[in-house]
Amino acid sequence: MVTVKLSSKFQVVIPRSVRVRLGLRPGMKLQVIEYQGRVEFVPVRKPGELKGFLGKIDTEIPRGDDRL
């Protein structure tokens, strides 16, 4: 776990190790969420970047005999 300090302008620096691991780049937008007393930053991704991130999902649904 890495600790950062909140500046007098309420800014924080995201440590390099975290930026690299998450693929954050300058100019990226982050969604800020307050959740159960903590602040979370979630990268806003373009729809094209999400293509294939779930891998192969089994889309077969067992059907009853009365279904086509």
Image: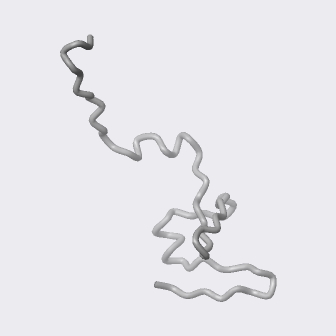
Where the C terminus falls, by quadrant?
Answer: top left
> Looking at this rendering, what residue extends furthest in the left direction?
65
Residue projecting furthest to the front = 66
Give how far across and how far down residue 62 sits, in percent: 22, 27
Foreground pick, 58 / 12:
58
How many numbered circles are shown?
0
Across and down, in percent, residue 53 comes to 41, 46
Asked whether 33 or 8 is in front, the reply is 33
Q: How is the image coloured?
A: one colour
Q: Position of residue 26 (x, y in %)?
A: 66, 64
Residue 38: quadrant of the picture: bottom right
Q: What residue is drawn where x is 51% and y is 62%?
A: 23
Residue at (56% x, 79% y) in the render: 15
Residue closer to the observer: 37 or 49 = 37
Answer left or right for 6 relative to 45: right
- Determine whether, in the image, residue 9 is placed left or right of residue 24: right
List x then y, in percent, for residue 58.
Answer: 27, 35
At a point 64% along the width and 68% down the height, the residue shown is 34
Q: Quadrant of residue 60?
A: top left
Residue drawn at the location 55% of the way across and 88% of the way down:
3
